[in-house]
Amino acid sequence: MIVKEKSQKITTMQNEVTSLEAKGSLAAEEQASKANALAIELEKQSEKLKKDITKQKIKKEALEARAGNADKKVQEINMKLEKLQRTSSDQKRRIQKTGHALKAAEDELMKAQLETTTKVKQLRELDCSNFEDS
């Protein structure tokens, strides 16, 4: 009897161990399945991130190229602006010189007209006095 009881206890314990092993095995399989699903999801996210990084690199290169072109255009425009400023300054100097020359010519003309008027007056006075003397 004792042997039978002990034998039954051993059998019961073996059944419990087998049951626990099965449960543990199921839990381990479930955890492995979850870990596998998580690994697959992480791989997908990793691939998506790699694609995003590649797209961003391409955008960055395109923007850098545009920035380089814009810099070249700015330099060209600055050179043209400097040339126009020099031309404008030269034209202003020429206009000032021409204005001074015109003013001097007008002054000379006024002086000549005044001299002419004075001489004409003198000549008329001489003519009139010669006419009276005759």
Image (cartoon, rainbow, N blue to C red):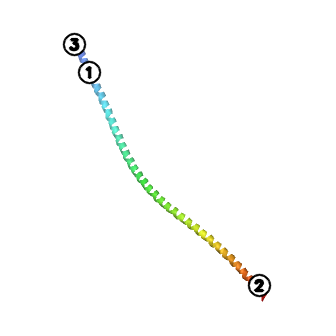
* Quadrant that contains the N terminus: top left
Circle 3 or circle 2, nearest the eye: 2
Tell me the amino acid under the disc marked 1: Val
* Residue in the foreground of this view, choosing between 57 and 27: 57
Mark 1: few/some/many CA within 10 Å (<14, 14-19, 20+): few
* Image-quadrant location for residue 9: top left
Q: CA distance from mark 1 to mark 2?
A: 161 Å
Q: Is residue 130 above or below residue 83?
A: below
Q: Position of residue 132 (x, y in %)?
A: 78, 86
N-term mark: 1 or 2: 1
Tell me the amino acid under the disc marked 2: Ser
Q: Position of residue 127 (x, y in %)?
A: 74, 85
Q: Name the side, left or right, on which 38 lies relative to 76.
A: left
* Residue in the foreground of this view, choosing between 46 and 112: 112
Q: CA distance from mark 3 to mark 2?
A: 180 Å
Q: For mark 2, what is the residue?
A: 129
Tell me what residue is drawn at x 42 percent, y 54 percent. Answer: 68
Q: For mark 1, what is the residue?
A: 17
N-term mark: 1 or 3: 3
Q: For mark 3, what is the residue?
A: 4
Mark 2: few/some/many CA within 10 Å (<14, 14-19, 20+): few
Tell me what residue is drawn at x 34 percent, y 38 percent. Answer: 42
Kindly check if marks 3 and 2 are in contact, taking CB atoms under 8 A apart as contact: no
Tell me what residue is drawn at x 35 percent, y 41 percent. Answer: 46
Q: Name the side, left or right, on which 87 lies relative to 126.
A: left
